[in-house]
Amino acid sequence: LKIENFGHSSFLIRSEEQSVLLNPFKAVGCASGLKEPNISADIILSSSLLPDEGSKNIAKGLFFVKPGSYIIDGFRFEGTASPHDRVGGRRFGMSTLWKWEQGGFTFAHLGGAAAPLSIEDRVLMGNPDVVFIAVGGGAKIYNGQEAANIIEILRPKIVIPVQYQLKDNE
């Protein structure tokens, strides 16, 4: 299993069975100044269609952004909707939280969400081995305490912080 970081909340997870790309982005907004990940993957999971975390034209592969249960070549991907902000999604809409198994690990990608996990989210996520979680504060990113609370609930073995801010933009 290999995990490659492209910055912001974009990662490529490769195993013998498949490759999964998370949140391909345009270098705008929070991701301005980063190199856009122009690559191919079997599956692309995006948190939303905001250009800084769900740009369809950046990478090639089977693209998913809408919540749902998907089975592709025997692999299950579960997506659930969660508010992208702390005001019920009224400012930035909804985000999709993803869970899947790959290379013997259970992964959860919490995207750019800033809302607390609902009971349904907790049930869907369970206790993943690896969690990608946005942290750093801002309008659509958990602050440190919020992220710590979620990690305490999910109890993953590995936590990968994403989308932390390098500048004062939100």
Image (cartoon, helix red, strand yellow):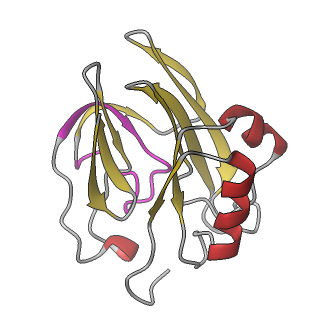
Residue drawn at point x = 43 percent, y = 9 percent = 74
Q: Is residue 77 visible in this depiction of the protein?
A: yes
In the picture, residue 68 is in which quadrant? top right
Residue at (29, 76) in percent of width and height: 32
Do we see residue 90 in this rendering? no
Determine whether 119 is above or below 15 in the image. Answer: below
Residue 103, quarter of picture: top left
Query: Residue 164, image x and y in percent?
Result: 45, 73
Name above or below for residue 127 compared with residue 115: above
51 relative position to 112: left or right: left
- Seen from the viewer's position, the closer of residues 41 and 55 is 41
Query: In the rendered view, does 82 fall on the left or right side of 52?
Result: right
Please identify the residue farthest to the right as the structure is shown. Answer: 119
In the current view of this chain or complex, which residue is farthest to the front?
157
| Image quarter hosting the N terminus | top left
Could you tell me which residue is drawn at 24 percent across and 47 percent down? 57
**Magenta residue span:** 40-58
Q: Is residue 90 left or right of residue 38?
A: right
Q: Nearer the viewer, residue 121 or 85?
A: 121
Would you say residue 69 sits in the magenta stretch? no
- Residue 161 relative to residue 2: left or right: right
Picture coordinates of residue 136, whole percent (x, y): 53, 76
* Camera-side residue of 127 and 83: 127
Name above or below for residue 28 compared with residue 44: below
Residue 49 lies in magenta, yes or no?
A: yes
Q: Is residue 111 above or below residue 141?
A: above
